[in-house]
Image (tube, rainbow, N blue to C red):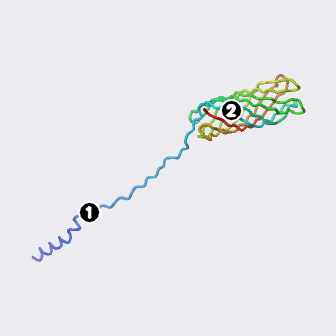
């Protein structure tokens, strides 16, 4: 009888411990780290654009005495195609000038260019090289002279908004035997540009 009573007593005392069964531990919340790289919003350089430029020109000749420097400015228009990492385009521009060529020999009056452009799409920045044909008009010794040459250059544009861009461009021009004068002209231009894209 004592054994039965002891057994009943120990069972009654142990009952609450077994009532809920085994207690499972609550798992710690899992921390997930987002490893997606932050990418700058893309900018599409494709489309027509127009703009204006203002800059400085330095002109040298091969002993013909036609040397000078001064300001110039004008307008440009073109079209670009954005292929993702690469942008290509074509542009025409015109700069008016009144640059004294030294010793009252004459002035450089204007330069027009037909340009091919290609470079890297860096998001809102576009770094490019350019090459093409250039035509210069000058007044030398009272005569109106003009000649066609070539140029090479480099530049960069930055998109300040979806439509407006600002940039800079450095171009080296070469005119051989300018209008049959026997004088070769080299012209270096450095310009600041602003553009509007449609």
> What residue sits right under mark 1 in the picture?
22
Q: Position of residue 154 (x, y in %)?
A: 69, 36
Which residue is at 88% across, 33% downward?
Answer: 102
Question: 63 or 72: nearer the eye?
Answer: 72
Structural crowding at the residue carrying mark 2, measured as other residues with C-alpha within 10 Å and reported as few (<14), some (14–19) or many (≥20)? many
Q: Is residue 53 above or below residue 143?
A: below
In screen coordinates, is 9 left or right of 130?
A: left
Q: Helix, strand or loop at disc 2?
A: strand
Dot placed on the residue nearer the N-terminal end, 1 or 2: 1
SS at circle 1: loop
| Front position in the image: 196 or 152 | 196
- Residue at the extreme left of the image, as rendered: 1
- Number of on-image labels: 2
Question: To which residue does mark 2 refer?
Answer: 130
Report which quarter residue 89 is drawn in. Answer: top right
Q: Quadrant of residue 43?
A: top right
Distance between the alpha carbons at the discs numbered 1 and 2: 78 Å
Query: In terms of image quadrants, where is residue 127?
Result: top right
> Which quarter of the figure is the C terminus placed in?
top right
Query: Residue 33, relative to residue 133: is it above or below?
Result: below
Q: Residue at 63% of width from left, 38% of height from top?
A: 164
């Amino acid at each position: 009888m004592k054994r039965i009573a002891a057994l009943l007593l120990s069972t009654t005392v142990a009952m609450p411990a077994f009532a809920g069964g085994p207690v499972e531990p609550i798992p710690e919340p899992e921390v997930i780290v987002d490893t997606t790289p932050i990418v700058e919003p893309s900018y599409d350089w494709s489309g027509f654009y127009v703009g204006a430029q203002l800059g400085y020109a330095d002109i040298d000749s091969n002993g013909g005495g036609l040397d000078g420097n001064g300001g110039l400015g004008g307008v440009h228009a073109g079209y670009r195609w954005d292929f993702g990492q690469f942008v290509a385009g074509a542009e025409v521009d015109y700069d008016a000038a009144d640059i004294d060529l030294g010793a009252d020999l004459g002035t450089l009056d204007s330069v027009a260019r037909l340009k091919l452009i290609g470079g890297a799409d860096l998001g809102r920045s576009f770094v490019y090289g350019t090459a093409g044909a250039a035509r210069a008009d000058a007044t030398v010794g009272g005569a109106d002279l003009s000649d066609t040459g070539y140029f090479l250059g480099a530049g960069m544009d930055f998109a300040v908004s979806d439509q407006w861009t600002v940039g800079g461009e450095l171009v080296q021009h070469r005119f051989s035997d300018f209008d049959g004068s026997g004088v070769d002209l080299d012209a270096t231009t450095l310009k600041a540009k602003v553009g509007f894209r449609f």
